[in-house]
Amino acid sequence: MKKGSFLSLSLLILSGELIFLLPYVLARVFRPTFLEVFNLNNFELGSLFSVYGTIALLSYIYGGVIADKFQPKKLIAASLFFTALGGLVLVNYPSYFTLKVLYGYWGFTTVFLFWGAMIKATRVWGGSDNQGQAFAFLDGGRGLVAASMSSLGVLIFSAFLINDIESSNLMERKEAFKYVILFSSFIVFMTGFLVLFLMKENQKNISKNENNLNSFLNIKIVLKIPSVWLIMIIIISAYVGYKVTDIYSLYASDVMLFNDLEAANIGSLQLYLRPMVCLVIALIAGKSNHIYLIVFGFITMLIGSIIFALGVVQLNMNLVFYFSLIIVATGTYAVRALYFSIMQEGTIPLVLTGTAVGLISIVGYTPDIFATPIIGYLLDKYPGLLGHQYVFSILVLFSILGLLASLKFARLNKIPVEES
């Protein structure tokens, strides 16, 4: 790979995760603390993500049109700048209504100018023979960025706590968490400058065929491709699993009775599984059919979610907790690393990638709207172990749905098991 191409890919990976640092990663890693300092319950936090998801869904397909008209580096840089500005609102611990507006704002800034361009650039970079490796490297790199930033966040939070976490009061925790937010905003903003000045520009103009990429005619063409609908189901099932990763730190706090710092470390450490899993996937993707790796991922996710749903993981069973968490996370990240790579196996034309990604994302990422409020409601209505059992029971159902869709995809495209 050429130096410029490698640098551009690195910046794509870096920006691809940092764009979600403020709206998602902080709440995932610091969930117990996040709820406390913003005076939220689980349902209210889920509702914030629902507002984000609603605006994001409206942005997916229209963002593809913008991505075809402007240089990606300028769109990505602008997206990072605008997203970072939202951190200046978050750091002041605004009202719940203002938080709703802020998350709606982030739903626009993180998707409209960014998402379609990132997926298409990755597909082009992977070529016809390396789709699995391309998407696995992208998601693995993003996972490494998320894990590194979360570890730094935990370090900053603990460094600015005046007293020990157990003896610190709410004001002290809010003051310490303020530095985590400011640090996150600064990193996102500076990444925007790196992208603007260092990312390589596309030298060729967009072809005439791609100028109408999101026209009504091309939307009709994409919707007639059977594999598109199956990929929608695969992504929506896997994304429910990804949304459940948001509560790992809360499970550690509510059920395993870890303190806030220990729970945050669980949220941070599980993020390191993502690049590790993606690296393994990248190494074997060239030798296996991607859809069968996805089947394996759903089976793994199903086994882990059943363990949690049955209430096996309880207080003083730390080893069982770690093992079960690793199983669920491994399955989730394996599927997530590959679900866009099967567009080629599904015979979706490269020229229609933007349209396909927009339509698939509109359905596939609906858990941003419905999953988080449902999860929040169950955790508030049924505190402790029972609420988490209900959440993982939902994941069991979606794991089965994703598994069935994956098997149907394999049969539809006549991929023999022997090839996997």
Image (cartoon, rainbow, N blue to C red):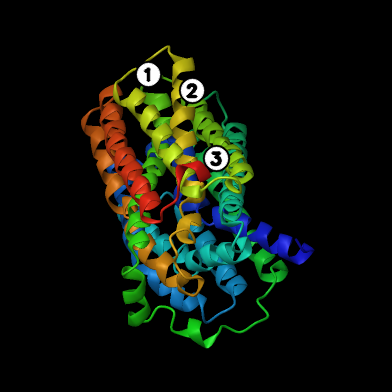
- Tell me where residue 98 appears, x and y as whole percent: 35, 57
For label 2, count other residues whose C-alpha is less than 10 Å away and answer few (under 14), some (14-19) or many (20+).
Answer: some
The amino acid sitting under disc 1 is Val
* C-alpha span from label 1 to label 3: 22 Å
- Tell me where residue 82 appears, x and y as whole percent: 51, 66
- Tell me where residue 322 appears, x and y as whole percent: 49, 22
The amino acid sitting under disc 2 is Tyr
Image quarter of residue 131: bottom right
The amino acid sitting under disc 3 is Arg
Q: How many marks?
A: 3
Mark identifier at residue 322: 2
Does label 1 or label 2 sit earlier along the sequence?
Answer: 1
Q: Please name the residue that numbered disc 3 is placed on.
A: 274
Report helix, strand or loop for mark 1: loop
Asked if disc 2 and disc 3 are in contact, CB closer than 8 Å, the reply is: no
Residue, x 69% and y 68% (percent of image)?
199
Residue, x 33% and y 49% (percent of image)?
408
Quadrant of the rendering where the N terminus is positioned: bottom right
Residue, x 66% and y 60% (percent of image)?
9
* C-alpha span from label 2 to label 3: 15 Å
Residue, x 49% and y 45% (percent of image)?
25
Report helix, strand or loop for mark 3: helix
Q: Please name the residue that numbered disc 1 is placed on.
A: 313
Is residue 63 positioned above or below 44 on the image?
below
- Tell me where residue 341 appears, x and y as whole percent: 51, 56
Q: In this rendered view, identify the residue nearer to me: 377 or 228.
A: 228
* C-alpha span from label 1 to label 2: 9 Å
